Image (spheres, rainbow, N blue to C red):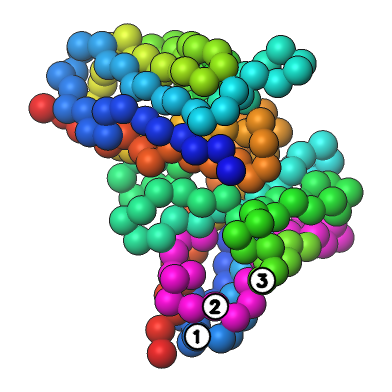
Amino acid sequence: QVQLQQWGAGLLKPSETLSLTCGVYGGSFGGYYWSWIRQPPGKGLEWIGEISHSGYTNYNSSLKSRVTISLDTSKNQFSLKLSSVSVADTAVYYCARSLNGMDVWGQGTTVTVSS
Amino acid sequence: DIVMTQSPLSLPVTPGEPASISCRSSQSLLHTNGYNYLDWYLQKPGQSPQLLMYMGSNRASGVPDRFSGSGSGTDFTLQISRVEADDVGVYYCMQAVQTPPTFGPGTRVDIK
């Protein structure tokens, strides 16, 4: 049973870079896309981007200039970096595995941007 | 981006009774391969979202057969044949036919 465990800094100041990592346990990267999704407080879900097992990336155009998603197959991890954060980036960030739907999700990381 | 809408946004339900949620998209979700790229998720209180249905009508692993999905093109429905107390939460539809995947606003289901 694949599990995703995510971690990273939860409190940032404006203009800093958000950095989160998602570990994949009990499975491999092959054949899937690995996604990041966020949820602002009290709001709905927003897809940030994804990376394939071979390293091909897709990003939401609304965030594309600030987002980088990368893969470390040797550590079974994938990561999210979001630069120049603002208060509007405050959200719970989720990682997820995707093939036919996003069928495995991480536990979520609350990221707060505040001066 | 494809805009997803859901109705109702709030749905009080009675255990044992059926429930239905509608999802509409601003563009067709029917791919040239014949599949509708529409997923349903449930976010229970305090939890991460969980996949219920993919490609419109396929139940995800472990999802009870009380849940069913239907529809094609731009109109989709999630039905619960007999609601249980554990079904409370926010239900989201999501289109995956075009990047970026986009979610509906969510339908909050709670017990009357």
Quadrant in which the C terminus of chain A appears: bottom left
- Left or right, A5 with respect to B75, comes to right
Where is residue A93 drawn, in percent x and y? 51, 60
- Left or right, B84 with respect to B111, comes to right
Mark number displayed over residue A14: 1
For marks 3 and 2 on the same chain, the one whose residue lies earlier in the sequence:
3
Where is residue A113 drawn, in percent x and y? 44, 79
Q: Chain of mark 3?
A: A
Per the image, the residue denoted by label 3 is A66
For the residues labelled 2 and 1, say whether their Cβ atoms are less than 8 Å apart. yes
For marks 2 and 1 on the same chain, the one whose residue lies earlier in the sequence:
1
Q: Mark 3 and mark 1: span between their CA atoms?
A: 13 Å
Q: Is residue B42 visible?
A: no
- Left or right, A105 with respect to B21, comes to right
Mark number displayed over residue A85: 2
Query: In front: B62, or B109?
Result: B109
Q: Are marks 2 and 1 on the same chain?
A: yes
Quadrant in which the N terminus of chain A appears: top right
